[in-house]
Amino acid sequence: MSETFRAYFVHMFTATGAVFSMLAMLAAADAKWSLMFLWLVVAFVVDGIDGPMARKYDVKHKAPIIDGVLLDLIIDYLTYVFIPAFALFQSGLLPGWSGWVAIIVITFASVLYFADTRMKTADNSFSGFPGCWNMLAVVVFATRPEFWVLLGLIVVLSVTMFLRIKFVHPVRTQRWRALTLPIALVWVAAATWAAWLDFAQPRPVTLVLIATSIYLLAAGAVQQVLYRERL
């Protein structure tokens, strides 16, 4: 297999995320929330694998016709932002005016963030909350908080998109990666388990999902404080 073919194969692998996002959207349109999240988890796994593959096979130089960064951002916006926002609105978890506020804030703030040239830090973390609304949505469906708690989380996370607060990338942020990556994998397992059981998961799974989510949200900010990092 030639190096060029392997590089373009990575782009095609990344592009399967668009297919999984469509399957997730079709499930969401039929209010099949568990199936929707299972497809989003598959897309999440693809997103976690394609980056290391792209660097290994040097797609930037071996397959330059396709912009891998742009391709990734398009798919990420669908899977991380657009579909989860639709699910939060359509599920009734945010009734009435709160649902409209949520989808407007999420989609508007996220598209600006995704186009922000400062979103990545020197250590390959994120500057500001990276718009992982799919992760929030899984936890919300699993825990069913009061709508005002959910709305508050959405507003706070949207604001932090544009603050100089660090959020770790489970794969690319080297500091604490030996801890962060296993925790991210545990999160994926717990999210898959919860979705598979139609969000009637055992309480320990719920607690694991919450605990791992808190770590993934807070680890970057803790690093900033402990190591006096400036973004």
Image: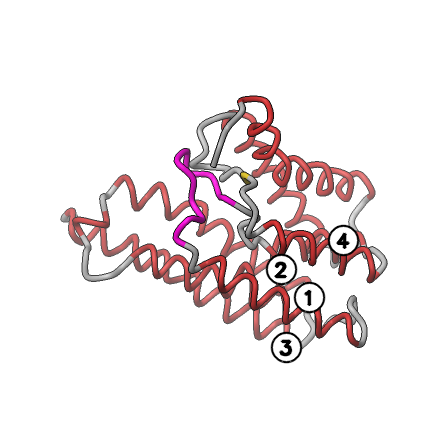
- SS type, badge 4: helix
At horizontal 45% and vertical 37% (from top left) the residue drawn is: 171
Query: Which residue carries the number 2 mark?
Result: 37
Q: Are marks 1 and 4 in contact (CB under 8 Å)?
A: no
Amino acid type, callout 4: Ala
- SS type, badge 3: helix
- Rounded to the nearest angstrom, the CA distance separating label 1 from label 2 is 6 Å
120 part of magenta stretch: yes
N-terminal-most mark, 3 or 2: 3
- Rounded to the nearest angstrom, the CA distance separating label 1 from label 3 is 9 Å
Please tell me the numbered disc located at residue 33: 1
- SS type, badge 2: helix
Task: Tell me if residue 221 comes above or below residue 67 in the rendering.
Answer: above
- Rounded to the nearest angstrom, the CA distance separating label 1 from label 4 is 11 Å
N-terminal-most mark, 3 or 4: 3
Amino acid type, callout 1: Trp
- SS type, badge 1: helix
Query: Which residue carries the number 3 mark?
Result: 29
Residue 204: percent from the left, percent from the top?
79, 38
Task: Tell me if residue 75 comes above or below residue 178 in the rendering.
Answer: below
Q: Badge 4, how many Cα within 10 Å: few under 14, some, many 20+?
A: many
Residue 9: percent from the left, percent from the top?
26, 55
Amino acid type, callout 2: Phe
* Residue 36 located left or right of residue 150: left
Residue 187: percent from the left, percent from the top?
63, 41
Q: Which region of the structure is painted magenta?
A: 117-127
Please tell me the numbered disc located at residue 142: 4
Q: Are marks 1 and 2 in contact (CB under 8 Å)?
A: yes
At horizontal 85% and vertical 58% (from top left) the residue drawn is: 146
* Residue 230 located left or right of residue 64: right
At horizontal 71% and vertical 74% (from top left) the residue drawn is: 100
